[in-house]
Image (spheres, coloured by chain):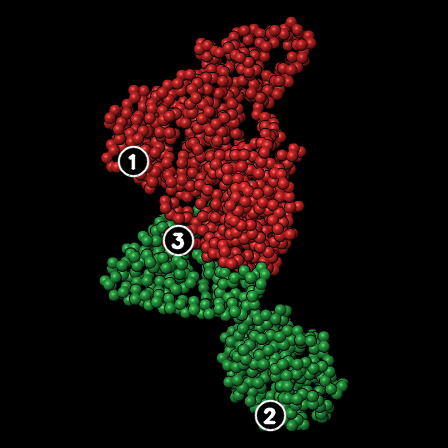
Amino acid sequence: MVEHGDIRVVHRGGSKINFREPVLSHDSRLLLCASGECVKVFSSSTEECVHDLQGHTDLVTGVLLNPSNHLQAYSCSADGTVRLWDFTDGILIKVQLHCHHRSPSGCVCFCAELFQLAALHLPQSGDQLVEAREFSSVLGDVSSNPAAIAFGQGVCTHRNHCHQRSGKCIKIFVPLRFSLKEDNKKGAKNTFTCLSCHPKDDCIATGHEDGKIRLWRNFNHKREYTYSTLHWHHSAVSSVRTNLLSGGVESVLVQWRYNQETQKDFLPRLGAAITHIAVSPDGELFCTAHSDNKLTVIQSCVKVSAVIQGLVKGESVRTDLMVDPRSKALVLNGKPGHLQFYSLQRDKQLYNLDIVQQEYIHESGLQQFEVVKAAFDTRGNWLATVEERKQKDSTLELNLKLWAYDEQTQSFVLNTTVSGPHEARITAMCFCHTADSQTTMLVSASQDGHFKAWQLAEGPFWSCDFVGAYHSLVPECCCFSADGSLLAISFQEVVTVWSPASWELLTTLSQPPGAIRDLCFGRQSCSKYLLGTTAKNLLCCWNLLTCTLEWSTSMDVSLLLSDPLSENMAAFCSHAGLFVFKPSEPRPLFSHKAICSGKVTRAVFAPREEMLESCEESSQWLNRSQLYFLTQYMDLMTFITKAEEDRLMASSKRLVIDDSVAVTPFYLLLGKHRQQQQEKQDRSFSAERNQLPQGSVAIKELLHTPAHVLPSASFLCSMFVRSLLISEKKSEEEEMESDKEEESECEMEASTMGQGQTAEAQETAAPALTKAQARELRRVKKLDHSWLSSLLDS
Amino acid sequence: MASFKPTKIQVYPKLGEKVTQDTLYWKNYKAPVQIKEFGAVTNIDFSPVAPHNYAVTAFTRIHIYGPFSQEPVKSFTRFKDTAYCGRFRSDGQLLVAGCEDSVVRLFDVSGKVALRMFKGHTKAVRVTDFTSDRYHILTGSDDYTCRLWDIPNSTELTSYQEHTDYIRCGITSKLNRDLFITGSYDHTLKLFDARVNKSVMTMDHGQPVESLLLYPSEGLLVSAGGRYVKVWDLLKGGQPLVSLKNHHKTVTCLCLSSNGQRLLSASLDRHVKVYNTTNYKVVHNFDYAASILSLGLAPDDESIVVGMTNGILSIKHRKSSEETKEISGQQKRRPAYRVFVKGKNYVPKQDDYLVSKPVKQHLAKYDKQLKRFNVSKALDTALETWTRFRKPEITVAVIKELDRRGTLKNALAGRDERGLSQLLNFLVGNLVDPRFAPVLVPATEMILDIYQSVIGQSPVVDVQLQRLQDLLEREIGYQQDLLEVLGMLDTMFTSSLPRKEVPCSGISRPNGLAQGDASAPGPQPQAT
C-alpha cells in the first residue's frame, strides 16, 4: 500500500473558544479569545469573526490587552512564544521567544509552567523577533488554572497584587511579599477555585469549591484583614469578577451589589456552566464563557446581547455525524437534548435545535433525555429524531419526533411526536432515499425484535405503516438502496432484503460467522452491490442481481460509509486505517495507515460546494465530497489535498498584509508618490541617490507609526495634496528635498530607528539595538510629532 | 438567555368520533321537538312548494304540519283503516294516500273530503305517488300489482303484475312522466315504462326492498332492504355500484340531503346514518329513542323529521346563525373587543421614540412553582380538585416532570393526612389507566416507601390504601384474563394462517396480526 503524500489529515475547526477567559477591548467593540492555535477577534455586537490572529504553532494559552496601548494585545502559547498583535487590523507586531522551552499557561507577563509563577520582563525593543531572557521565577507551587491568578490595581498605583492559590492557602504578593493562611477549620471543600481583585478598593473576592464567595478586605494593613462570606451557588464557583459577578455550574450569572450583598441580580438559563467572566474596561459589557464552547456578551443591565457559539463537543456523539442537505451544515449532538447545526466552512454553529424541549436541570447523577438517533431525508424536508432516557429500575422512555422544515422560519418545526415507538432501544433508523417519490418513509429498527415503517398520513402526520420481524431476531442495521426500491435489514448474522412497496421479504443473505455490524448499499453504478461488515472482521460484498457473495475480505472494519455523490465507499479499520474503494474494483483507490491516534468513532461524507478538479488518481475520490471524521478524543478532522491546501494558503496570503508596510490608503497614495519620485530621481538626479534612503526614512517612519499616534488625517491630507502640487515643479522639489535632508539630519535618532525597522522588514540580520538606543527609541515614541509638521511646512 | 420551558402536557389522542365539517354541520340542530301520534309513523313527505309543509302518515290519519308548528295545520281523518304513504303532488296542491282497505284517496290540500277514490286493488295499498306530468297516479299494493291511474277520469290505465310479493316501495321519475320504479318483498327492483306493458329493467337487491330513492340526476338509484343499502347505476343497465352495510337492523327509509352531497338512511336499529355520496363513508350518525320507520329532510336541511314505531314524531330544526352566536356568547361573557385593541392600534409617528416592553411569558401556576423549584407546591397546584378530575393529564405531566428533575420524592414527602388522601385518591382514580400507568406506578411505589411508617395511624389514609390494594388486585386479575385470551387468539391465528414456505415463513406476527392488516398496531402518533 502506498502512502499518498499529497493528501494530508488536518484538524478542521471546532476548537474551543472557551478555553481561556475572553478579553473585551477598550471600546468594548471587539472580543478576543484564544481558540486553538489562533486568537479570534469577534465583534461584540454582530457576533461575526473579524480577524483570525494566526501565527502560533501550538495551543494559545492566554490573551491579554497591552496595558500601555489598548489597541494591542499579547498572546502566549504552548509553543513558547509571546506575541504582540494589533488586533483591530489583525497584524502581528512582535514575537517574543522564551529562551527555555517552556509552555506558558497563565497570563502574559506572568507565565506559569510546572505550576511555577514566573515574571517575564518583556524587553522593549523595535525588533519584531525578540528573545526574552529575563525570566524570573516568582513562586512555585501554583495551580495550573489561570483563573487563580489575578492582577489588582490597589489604591496605591505602584503596588501590584498578585494572588494565587495553592492548596488551601492564599498568598498575597505585594512587593514586600507576605502570605496569609486562611482560617481553615470547617472542612475539606473550601479550596479556592478562582479569585479577583477590586479595581479600586482594597478588596479581594475568592470563589470556593463549596459554592461560597469570600470577600477579603484590608490587605494594606498587615494581618488585619477581614472577610465576609456570600453563599448562593450550590457547587464550585467557577468565575468571580469584581463589581461583583459570579457564575458556576448552574449557568446563572449572579450580579452582587457591592457593599449591599444581600441584593443580587440574576441572569438565569445561560445554557451551560459558566467557566469565565470578563468585564469590559468601561464596565458596560460582560462576557461569559460557557462550558459548551459558547461566549455570551451581556449588557450591564443584565441582558444578553450576543451569543458566539462554537462547536459543542460532548463526551460522545450518539447520533451519527450527518450533513443537512439544505444548509450543508454538519449535524450532531450539541448541548444536552439539542442537535447542533455547525457550518464547516465558517467554523461557526448555525443554530441549535431543541429536540427535547424541556427545562434543563443541572444535577449530578440525574438522567437526562438524550438525542440518540437522528436522520434527514434526501431533500432535507424532514428530520427524524429519537430521544431516550433510562432511569435505573424504571422503564425506558423513548420518543420518536418528526420535524418538518418550514420555509418561512427557515428551521425545523415539530410535526409528530410518537411516544414509545418501540418497546426497546432503537438500533437504527433511516429515511427512504428516493428523490422523486411523493411519499416519504422512515424505517426504525429496535431491540424489541421489530422494525417499523412510518409514513406520512393524512393530517399530515406520521403514522406506523408496517411492523416486521424475522425469526424474533434483533435487527441491528437498516439501509435503503439508492433508488429506494430495496430495504436491507440485518438481523444478527442474516441480512434480509425487503421490498418497501409490498413489504415482501425478497431474499435473505448471510455470511456466517459473525453478526453484521454495518450495512451499506453501493451508489450510482455500483447500486447492485450491498456491503456489510461483520463482527468477525469480514467485509462482504453481495451482488443483489445474482444474490450471491461477490467478494469478501478479512478486515476489521469499524466503520463503513458510502459517499452519496459517487460510487466510493470508505472503510475505517479499528486501528484508524482508512480504505477508500469502489465495490466493483478490486484495488482500493486510497489507503492510509493510522490517520489519527485512537479509533475513528464517526465519519461522514460532506458534499463540496464546488467540485474539485484533481486529475490525480489518488485524490479523485475527494473531488465531489469531503470526508470528515471524529476521533476518539472528539477532534473533528478531514482530508485535504495538496492542491487545495495551496489554494487555501494563497487565499490566506492574499489576506495577510505585507509585514513591512501596512497597507493603508495613505500608503497607497504615498507609495505612488514615492515611485514617481524615484523614477524622476533616477532619471535626472543620480547624484542625489545616496540621499534617497534618508529621505524615505521619514516616510517610513510615518508609515510605521501606528495610526492612532499620527496627527489628524485632515492635516496629513493637506500635506499630500500640497506635495502632489509641488511635484510638478522640479526646482521647488529640489529645495524641498534638500530641506528634508537637513531636517532628517536633525532627527538622527528617528532615522536610526527607521533603519532598524527597514532592516527588520527586509528580514536581514539587523544589528541588535543597544539599551541606550532602546531608551532613545522610547523617548522618540513619546515625543511630540511636531517634527513631522515642521518637516512638511518647509 | 433562553426562557423557561414550560412542562409539556402530553396530548393523548381523543377516542371516539373526530370533529369534522360534517359533524359540525349535522350537530348544528336544536333540541328535537317531539309530537305524539296515534300510531307508528309510516311516512313523512315534504311539500315541494314553500312554506314546505309536511304530511305525516300515522295510523288512520294524515297530519300536515307547518314548518315550525307543533300542532297540525290540517289533518285528513277520513280513512277507514290504516293510511299509508301520503304524498304531495309537485305543485303542492294535491295529496294522495293509500289505505289498508285497498282504496286510494286523492285529497285537495285545502279541502277535507277526498276528491277522488281509486278502487281496483284487492289488498292494502302501500305505495302511492304522482307521475311527473301530474295527471297520473302510481300505486303499488300487497296484491303484488302496481297500477297507473288517470286523475281526471279516475280510471285505471295499466296494471303490471310482475312482482311476486308485496310491493312496499315505489318512486316515479321526476324527469320522465312514463318511468317509475317499484321495489318488492320478492327482493327485486323493477323499472317500468308506461309506454310498454312490461318492466324494462330488473335488479336483484337480495333482501326484501323497503325503500327507494332516485338521485336528482336520476342516473343512480338507491335501494334499502334488509341491512343493506345498495346503489345502482341505471345508465349502465342497473349495474350495482356500491353495497353499504352500516346498520345492524333493517333499513327502512332513505333520504337525500338537499344539495345531493349526503345520503341519509334510517333503520330499525334506531340510528340515522349520513353518508358521503362520493365515497359512501359514514360521516355522521344520529341516535333516536325507538326504531325508525320514516325520515324526512326539509329543503336546505332546515329540519330533520323522524317518525318512529312508538308513534313519536321527532323534529329537529336547524339553528339559525344568530342563535349559534347567541349561545356561544352566553356561555362566557368576554370583555369587549375594544378592550383588547386599546392602545395597540396606535400607529407611531415618524419621529416618535419607541420603547418596547419585553413580552411577558405566561406560565401556568404549577410552572411558576417549578420555575422557583418549589416542588411540593407545584405538586399541590397540580393536585387541585379541578385539575385532578378534569385534566388528570396535567397532574400526571407534573409528576413526570418532577420525576425527571429527580425531586419527586421531596415533593411527595411531608404531606399531612388531607394531602396524602388527596394524592391516594388521585392514584386510585388513574393508576390503572394505561396512558398514565408508566408514570404513576413508580410514584405509587415511592409513596408507599415514604409513608409505610405511618400506616395504621389514620383511618382515612388506611381506607384509601385499602382501595388501592383492591384496585391493583382486580387489575392483575384482568390482565391475567387478557393474557389468556391473547394466548388463545395466537393459537387460533397460527392454525388458520396458511404457512408460506419460502422466504416469508420467517415473518412472525405477534398477537395474531393478519398478513394484510398492516395498519398501525403500534401507538397512535399524536399531533403537536
Mark 3 in CB contact with mark 1 (< 8 angstroms): no
Q: Position of residue B332 (x, y in %)?
A: 45, 64
- Circle 2 is placed at which residue position? B100
Chain that appears green: B
Disc 2 with disc 3 on a shared chain: yes
Disc 3 with disc 1 on a shared chain: no
Is B449 left or right of A703, judged from the image as shown?
left
Q: Residue at x 63, y 46 (%)?
A: A523
Chain that appears red: A
Relative to residue A96, is residue B288 depicted above or below?
A: below
Q: Amino acid at mark 1?
A: Asn
Q: Residue at x 47, y 56 (%)?
A: A448
Disc 2 with disc 1 on a shared chain: no
Chain under label 1?
A
Q: Amino acid at mark 3?
A: Glu
Q: Amino acid at mark 2?
A: Glu
Relative to residue A188, is residue A704 depicted above or below?
A: above
Judged from the image, the secondary structure of the residue bearing numbered disc 3 is helix
The answer to whether residue B325 of the structure is visible from this angle is no
Residue B401: give its label: 3
Is A243 left or right of B130, judged from the image as shown?
left
Chain under label 2?
B
In the rendered image, which quarter contains the N terminus of chain A?
Answer: top right
Nearer-N-terminus badge (2/3) = 2
Q: Position of residue B503 (x, y in %)?
A: 58, 59
